[in-house]
Image (cartoon, grey):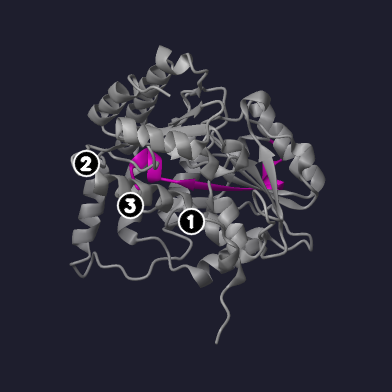
Amino acid sequence: MIKRNSGLANLTAGYLFPEIARRRREYAASHPDAKIISLGIGNTTEPLSKHIAKAMSDYALGLATPEGYSGYGDEQGNSELRAKITETFYKNMASADEIFISDGAKCDIARIQTLFGSKAKIAVQDPAYPVYVDGSVVIGAAGKNGGKGYKGVTYLPCTPENNFFPDLSKVKKNTLIYFCSPNNPTGATASRDELKALVDFANKNGCIIIYDAAYFAFIRDENLPKTIFEIPGARTCAIEVNSFSKPAGFTGVRVGWTVVPNDLKFADGSLVNKDWNRIMTTLFNGASNIAQAGALAALDEQGIKDMTAQVDYYLENGRIIKTTLDGENFKKHGVEVYFTGNGPYVWAKFPGKTSWDVFDKILRECNVVTTPGSGFGPAGESFIRFSSFGHRADIEEACARLSKFQL
């Protein structure tokens, strides 16, 4: 018999979000009358912009005509869309041939593991989006260590004590550094000086940064960088992964992109861009032509306005949640609340409590689903992530329940 992939066997407990779904189902089954509201998984909730939806609808209808039909597209993505992304987000920072369109940031992050293989050393912010580590385990770059975390992964605690920016001195030379800003789950957004320190460190130590910018559209502080390529030197040490999921509501439509500079090289001098192109043309067959038509519409004048309004809506939800968690019933128990106004998540510490215990208590007493911070890494223990993705009425109802919550 063929042996099981040892990487899959090495994965610890179930992936965070399916575990949350399991607990929710079990609770709902035993409390059928409960109206459960989710402030958990970061899934968008508001309808697509009519302008963007119409562009996809028109393209789809065109497929039923000889002149509108399209078969396979370029695996790297629609050339017009690649150029538009460059013009809109990376002017004078990247070229269209460095932009690769995909079916989403998560998928690209998983494929990136294939780019570097099982021998790569890994460093991740802690807490961090689980796919950074889990994908490394599946590919064989990390494994069980008999305790917290995984062998082969350097965890970089990002806590209130260090302003959610890691101690880079813990990173070994020639390491892949996974970095997310605005961060999921903490919501922290790195400053220009912090990103300059990260880029300088990477260049000096032969590291490559996998920069997850999926929440870039939430940054409202004009002094904060929206892309790693605003930082001098980033083109020789960084890959940026990005997505239309959150700003345009494409969580189910599925369009993202990755920027791989032509200046980025492996130790032998070969181009990372060239190998990434091979992976995308070999393991991927291109994002949906219909979805890419929607992405193009999202980047015209009306589309930008619509995306900005959508993000503003979620940011206001975040402010409502923060105001609730700043209430006296939480404050008297020493709950610490973090929300920058530049990301969609509110990060709250419940001192002396485990994340899953707080999750279960909020679910039982408020019928509200959250996300336990420990699911994002060891440094997330005692924290809960509250997501601002939700209908305003549901956010307000959830907050009304939380305002009466007692630890």
Quadrant for residue 143, please give it. bottom right
- Residue farthest to the bottom, as pictured: 1
Specify the amino acid type for callout 2: Lys
Q: Quadrant of the N terminus?
A: bottom right
Whole-percent x, y for residue 269 in the image: 77, 61
Identify the residue position indicated by label 3 in the image: 252
Whole-percent x, y for residue 175 in the image: 74, 51
Which is nearer the N-term, disc 3 or disc 1?
1
SS label for mark 3: loop
- In front: label 3 or label 1: 1
**The disc label shown at residue 169, or none:** none
Drawn side of residue 112 relative to residue 84, left or right? right
Identify the residue position indicated by label 1 in the image: 14
Q: Label 1: how many residues lie within 10 Å, few (<14), some (14-19) or many (20+)?
A: few
Specify the amino acid type for callout 3: Gly
In this view, 330 is above or below 361: above
In this view, 336 is above or below 18: above
Image point (34%, 26%), residue name: 317
The answer to whether mark 3 and mark 1 are in CB contact below 8 A is no
Identify the residue position indicated by label 2 in the image: 50
Image point (25%, 26%), residue name: 397
Over which residues does the magenta segment extend?
232-250
> Is residue 355 highlighted in magenta?
no
- In front: label 2 or label 3: 3
**Would residue 318 be seen by someone viewing this image from the given angle?**
yes
- In front: label 2 or label 1: 1
How far apart are labels 2 and 3 at the CA level?
Answer: 16 Å
Which is nearer the N-term, disc 2 or disc 1?
1
**Would residue 114 be seen by someone viewing this image from the given angle?**
no
- Residue farthest to the front, as pictured: 30
Specify the amino acid type for callout 1: Gly
Whole-percent x, y for residue 326 in the image: 43, 16
